[in-house]
Every structure is written in C-alpha cells, then in structure tokens.
Amino acid sequence: MSFWLILLLFFVVATIYSSAGFGGGSSYLAILAIALYPIEEMRVIALVCNIVVVFGSIINFHLKGIKPWYDAILIMAASIPLAFLGGTIQLPKSYFLLLLGLVLLIGALLMFIDYDRFTVKRPNKITLPIVGGIIGFVSGLVGIGGGIFLAPVLHLQRWKAAAEIAALASFFIFVNSIAGLVGQFSRNPVIDYPKLGMLVLVVLVGGQIGNRLVITSLKPEHVRFVTAVLIAIVGINLISKEYKVILDLFAF
C-alpha cells in the first residue's frame, strides 16, 4: 500500500468518524496493519491522530453547549492510569495482531447493534469505573481511544441523549489517547516523524470537515454499517492469520 493511499484513507476515516464524535483509531490501526507498519509505530500514529480529530469534536460540542465533562470523572478515574499501563506493554507481534483482530471484530459487532431494541441496567458509581478501567487498559494496549466500546455501552444503558454520549465518547477518546501515548513514548518508540506529520495534517483537515459537514445523502446508520463491515473484514483477516497463537495458548 502506497503512503499516498494511506493518506487518502486516513482523510476519509477522519471525516466520517469525526461527524459522529469519534477519532477513528480502530480504522487507522486496520489500515496500518494492512500496510504492514511496525507495531510500535502503528500504536503511536493511531493515538496521535485520535487526539487531533477528537479535540476538534470536543471544541464543537462545547460551543454547542453539550458539556458532559463532569459526568466523565468516574469513568476516567480508572481508565487514565490503566490506559497508560496498557501503553507501556509491548506484546509479541503475533499476540498483538491477534488482540487487534479481536478488538476490531468486537468493535464492529458493537456497531451492528440496534440500540433501540435493547436496554440493560443503568450504570452506577461502582460499575462505571470498572467499565472505564477495562476499556482504558485495552485501548492503551492496542492503541485506540476506546470510544467504539464506551459509546455502545452507554447507548445500551440509555445513559444520556445521543449527543451527550457522543460528546463524552470524544472526551474519553481524547484523554485515554493521551494517557496511552505517554505510555507508548515511555518505551522510546522509533517513529518516522515526517510521515506522522503528514498523517496528522490530513486527519486535522478531515476532522474539521467532518465536524462541520452535514452529509444529507448518507444516513448515519448506513455509514456505521459500512464502517463496521470493513473493520470486521480486517479483524477476521488478522485473526485467521494468527489463529495458531490461539491453538498454542490452549495446547497442553
């Protein structure tokens, strides 16, 4: 995959995801996995691009008066340190790709859920930090912000209105991405900064367009469906390539 194609794909991902308040970390990782980027560089790129995209979303939500930041304290209390911890861990390549495949597949399945047809018990002061901590650790370990996991959980629990959930997911992604990135840099990763700079530029532009552009020809559920299918395909592909790791784990 040429770098110019990667730039184009990052731009498209940033534009689509930012319109829903997400950063696109899972899709960035999927693209970089297909392009065979080194694991440590994949995680740093995805997290940096996440931060750039969702920061614009946070500002726009704030300007619109949607400010559920204080409600995020319970979730962040556990997610921030665990995202940092996850970022400090470097898994062997096969284990990382297998985990990434599982994360992408689970994220895709969550996107397929019709939230209006299901309702689970509302979260409380005990479960929110637990959920936030688990998502934070996995996010830091893989290199995503965790919004694709948190948003479905909050939607299923009818936590708040959709706009407030999107705003909180943006803030969650932003904070966790920073924590995970700090953990990543504690390992002194080797990064191609000129290429990283170009990727940051295209997601910045794409994110700003997505934040402001109303695409009347595409319904949000259609965009979500197409995105979920593409992520699922990459996830299944990674799992199928690393299935021997699963066999080794359960070998006696």
Image (cartoon, rainbow, N blue to C red):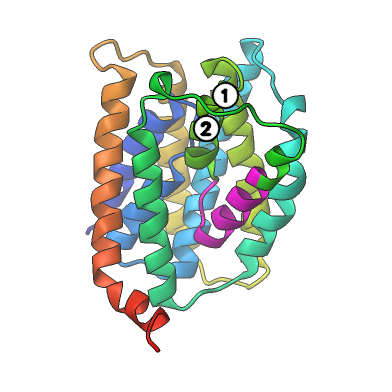
Q: Give me the residue at 62% from left, 72% from top.
A: 188
In which quadrant of the rendered image does the C terminus lie? bottom left
* Highlighted range, magenta: 131-145
Marking on residue 165? 1
**What x and y, as percent, mark residue 228?**
30, 39
Cβ atoms at labels 2 and 1 below 8 Å apart: yes
Left-right relation of 174 to 5: right
Left-right relation of 148 to 170: left
Q: Which residue is mark 2?
A: 151
Relative vertical location of residue 60 with respect to residue 196 in this rendering, above or below = above
Q: Amino acid at mark 2?
A: Ala
- The numbered mark, 2 or 1, whose residue comes first in the sequence reads 2
Secondary structure under tag 1 reads helix
Q: Amino acid at mark 1?
A: Ile
Q: Give me the residue at 51% from left, 74% from top.
A: 91
Left-right relation of 209 to 55: left
**What x and y, as percent, mark residue 94?**
38, 76
Q: Give me the residue at 53% from left, 51% from top.
A: 47
- The secondary structure that dominates the magenta segment is helix
| Direction bottom: furthest residue | 252
Relative vertical location of residue 2 with respect to residue 220 in this rendering, above or below = below
Quick one: 215 or 168, which is closer to the camera? Answer: 168
